[in-house]
Image (spheres, rainbow, N blue to C red):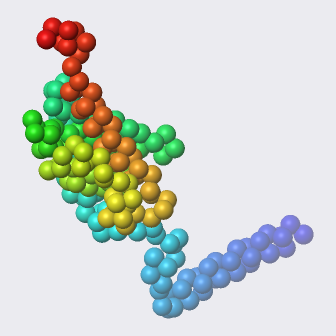
Amino acid sequence: MKFRQAQAGKMAAAGAGRLRRAASALLLRSPRLPARELSAPARLYHKKVVDHYENPRNVGSLDKTSKNVGTGLVGAPACGDVMKLQIQVDEKGKIVDARFKTFGCGSAIASSSLATEWVKGKTVEEALTIKNTDIAKELCLPPVKLHCSMLAEDAIKAALADYKLKQEPKKGEAEKK
C-alpha cells in the first residue's frame, strides 16, 4: 500500500513538472505583453512637475536673521510635506531673491520651485496675489495633489508676513525716536 502511495506521489510530481514546463513553453511562444500592461496603471506627473522636480530652481536658504528676509515654514500633517520658503526684499519693496527647501513629494517640490520663480521681481503686494489655483493650473496638478499648491501659497504668505513683522519698529526703538 505504501509503495502505491509513493508511486502515485512521484507520478503527480512528474505530472506537475510537465505541466509547469508546458505552461512555460506556451508563454515563451506567445507574444509578450509589455510590463506596463501587466502592472497597475502608473500615475504620471506632468512634464512641468517633472522639470521642476529634476531641475529645482532657487533651492537653498537666506539669512533668516536679516531684516530684509522673510521666512515662511509650513507643513501638511496629513501627507508629511514640509516647506520653507524665504524671500529677500530690497528697500523699494521688490522681492529680489527667493529660496526654498522642501521635504515632500515631487508635486510639493515643483510647487515650491515655481513659487520662488513667480515671486522674484514682484512687489510684496503683488506676491500676495499668487494663488494656489494658479500654481496648480501651471503645473497641471491632479486633484489629489492640490494640497501641494496650497502649501506653496501658504509658504509665500507666511514669508511675507514674517518680512512685514520685521519691518515694524520694536517698542523700544519707537520710544527712542
Q: Nearer the viewer, residue 30 or 101?
A: 101
Query: Is the C terminus in the top left, top right, bottom left or bottom right quadrant?
Result: top left
Q: Is residue 146 above or below residue 163?
A: below
Q: Residue at x 15, y 26 (%)?
A: 66
> Where in the figure is residue 137, as x and y percent of width and height?
36, 65
Could you say where residue 48 lies in the image, as x and y percent from the top left? 29, 66
Residue placed most toward the observer, 155 or 83: 155
Q: Quadrant of the N terminus?
A: bottom right
Above or below for 144 versus 174: below
For this view, does 114 lie left or right of residue 144?
A: left
Picture quadrant where residue 157 is located: top left
Taking the spot 27% from the left edge, 38% from the top edge, the residue there is 160
Can residue 173 be seen here? The reply is yes
- x, y percent for residue 111: 32, 54
User: In the picture provided, is 6 more to the left or to the right than 33?
Assistant: right
Residue at position x 49%, y 40% in the image: 77
* Residue found at the very far left of the displayed protein: 91
Q: Which residue occupies the foreground of this view, 20 or 36?
A: 36
Residue at 45% in and 76% down: 36
Is residue 26 left or right of 168 when viewed as pictured?
A: right
Of residues 122 and 33, which is closer to you in this image?
A: 122
Q: Is residue 139 above or below residue 158?
A: below
Q: Quadrant of residue 125?
A: top left
Residue 104 seen in the current view: no
Tag count in the figure?
0
> Residue 176: x, y in percent?
15, 8
